[in-house]
Image (cartoon, rainbow, N blue to C red):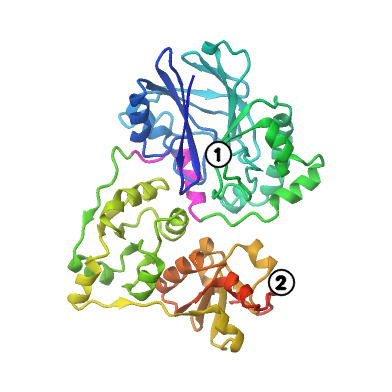
């Protein structure tokens, strides 16, 4: 049996390629949309993709199952569990007409890829239709599975969060019933043999859990011993534990659920953004176009195009652009030449396909030479607040997650997670200055860029809560009576 994990560091997302070397046939589990890399990888191993599946309808990235089926003609295996709201709606909508070659899976159904047997197991809780895949190497003489692809069911050190149907997809009242369903699904997992390898869909950094480990794979036995979420015998205690402290999901999660169910748009090839000069950038600024500046914070802070968003090409990039940009908006990038493709791939993985143009940072000097103005973001060290009272015309905004805020925040601060600013923008007063902070600088920097674009007068508080604590600044836990409205 052939086995490889292909990992996306920014989304902390794992795809798996499982192949039968005897027949040259391969299965891809949970692919992303830039599917050529799977095709090339399998071809380099002397195999071909004959089957594609995914563990569930994803919220954190746009699925590549449909794109890969278009390019390879491979058979699609997807869940037929869950109610009518969780059924795939694109299987009969092939781009050239007709249906894809597909099989809908119920709990316990099996299929083969060469001499590899794959059994689908319904494991609801994270989502109603979620499935895991037990993999047995029949060609190697095995009579029991070697491993289980767990998707967003069981991670290393954590389990999939059950609140996204409510917090991301907007189904009010869904998170507690989902948590109870997840508890029951985990009882099945606890009865699996200890030797079974666990191949999770995400690692540390994913927003699909709250305490994912950085180790890429595990075993059932190890997780039963050391995964805290698996230690609960009482359902009520588990529900309280699993729902507590879950971070606010990025805004784009709701859109991913919808698009993955209805059918992601077919790309065919990656967008090819046009290289822009200084004149073109000046025109875009006048038009109020969506410009994403990927330079480091210090460079952005000291001079950027008016209205440009700050989004470095780090692990935070998908969360920032996915929370501040709509899919129908053309996107223009300030990005180094050698990182253009990287930025494009990051964007299409979350369904932001309209990447219309880019300019390397050196073009900003040309903007200046043509009379254009670069905007600076005011900033001050957060420790300086200890020596002054908050001005009456100022709102202190904490853009960390609510669980972080509740554990301790600066006196008088108001909390909106940086990924939820768009739907809560009306809570911020237009007649006040906004002083923004987070734990260090990263989330608050992204929020500052967004709020500037929205017309607020923003000051970034450098160093965040970490610097505040180091300087022995006061943290409070009560929610302030004065709100932003």
Most foreground residue, 27 or 146: 146
- For the residues labelled 1 and 2, say whether their Cβ atoms are less than 8 Å apart: no
Mark 1 or mark 2: which comes first in sequence? 1
Magenta segment's dominant SS is: helix
| Residue 56: x %, y % from top left | 54, 36
Residue 88 to residue 381: above or below: above
| Residue 216: x %, y % from top left | 55, 39
Secondary element at image label 1:
loop
| Residue 264: x %, y % from top left | 41, 40
The quadrant holding residue 202 is top right
- Disc 1 or disc 2, which is closer to the eye? 1
Q: Disc 1 designates what residue?
A: 216
In the displayed structure, does residue 195 sit left or right of residue 85?
A: right
In the displayed structure, does residue 225 sit left or right of residue 34?
A: right
Residue 290: mark: none
Residue 152 to residue 435: above or below: above
| Residue 401: x %, y % from top left | 60, 62
- Asked whether residue 94 is in view, the answer is no
Most foreground residue, 180 or 229: 229
Q: Disc 2 designates what residue?
A: 477
| The C terminus sits in image quarter | bottom right
Residue stretch rendered in magenta on the structure? 251-266
View extreme (right): residue: 234
Residue 255 magenta-drawn? yes
Secondary element at image label 2:
loop
């Amino acid at each position: 049996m052939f086995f490889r994990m292909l990992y996306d560091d920014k989304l902390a997302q794992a795809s798996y390629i499982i192949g039968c070397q005897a027949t040259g046939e391969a299965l891809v589990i949970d692919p992303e949309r830039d599917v050529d890399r799977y095709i090339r990888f399998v071809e380099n191993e002397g195999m071909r993709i004959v089957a594609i599946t995914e563990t569930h309808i994803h919220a954190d990235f746009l699925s590549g199952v449909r794109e890969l089926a278009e390019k390879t003609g491979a058979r699609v295996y997807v869940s037929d569990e869950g109610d009518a709201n969780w059924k795939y709606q694109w299987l009969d909508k092939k781009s050239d007409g007709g249906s894809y070659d597909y099989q809908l899976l119920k709990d316990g159904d099996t299929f083969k890829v060469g001499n590899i047997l794959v059994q689908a197991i319904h494991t609801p809780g994270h989502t109603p239709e979620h499935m895991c895949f037990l993999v047995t190497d029949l060609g190697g003489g095995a009579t029991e599975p070697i491993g289980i692809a767990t998707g967003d069911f069981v991670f290393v050190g954590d389990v999939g969060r059950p609140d996204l149907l409510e917090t991301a997809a907007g189904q009010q009242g869904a998170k507690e019933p989902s948590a109870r369903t997840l508890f029951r699904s985990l009882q099945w997992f606890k009865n699996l043999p200890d030797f079974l390898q666990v191949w999770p869909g995400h690692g540390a950094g994913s927003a699909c859990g709250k305490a994912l480990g950085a180790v890429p794979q595990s075993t059932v036995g190890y997780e039963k011993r050391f995964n805290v979420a698996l230690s609960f015998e009482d359902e009520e205690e588990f529900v309280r534990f699993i729902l507590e402290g879950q971070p606010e999901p990025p805004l784009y999660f709701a859109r991913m659920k919808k698009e993955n169910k209805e059918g992601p748009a077919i790309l065919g090839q990656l967008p090819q953004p046009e290289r822009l000069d200084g004149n073109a950038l000046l025109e875009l600024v006048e038009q109020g176009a969506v410009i994403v500046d990927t330079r480091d914070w210090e460079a952005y802070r000291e001079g950027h195009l008016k209205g440009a968003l700050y989004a470095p090409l780090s692990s935070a990039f998908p969360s920032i652009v996915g929370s501040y940009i709509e899919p129908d908006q053309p996107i223009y990038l300030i990005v180094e030449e050698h990182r253009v493709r990287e930025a494009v791939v990051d964007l299409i993985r979350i369904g932001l396909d309209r990447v219309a143009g880019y300019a390397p940072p050196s073009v900003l000097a040309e903007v200046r030479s043509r009379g254009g103005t670069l905007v600076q973001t005011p900033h001050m060290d957060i420790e300086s607040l200890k020596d002054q009272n908050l001005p009456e015309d100022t709102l202190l905004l904490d853009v960390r997650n609510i669980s972080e805020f509740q554990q301790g925040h600066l006196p008088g601060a108001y909390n909106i997670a940086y990924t939820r600013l768009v739907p809560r923008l009306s809570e911020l007063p237009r007649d006040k200055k906004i002083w923004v902070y987070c734990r260090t600088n990263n989330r608050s920097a992204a929020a500052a860029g967004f709020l500037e674009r929205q017309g607020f007068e923003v000051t970034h508080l450098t160093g965040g809560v970490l610097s505040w604590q180091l300087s022995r600044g006061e943290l409070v836990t009560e929610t302030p009576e004065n709100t932003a409205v």
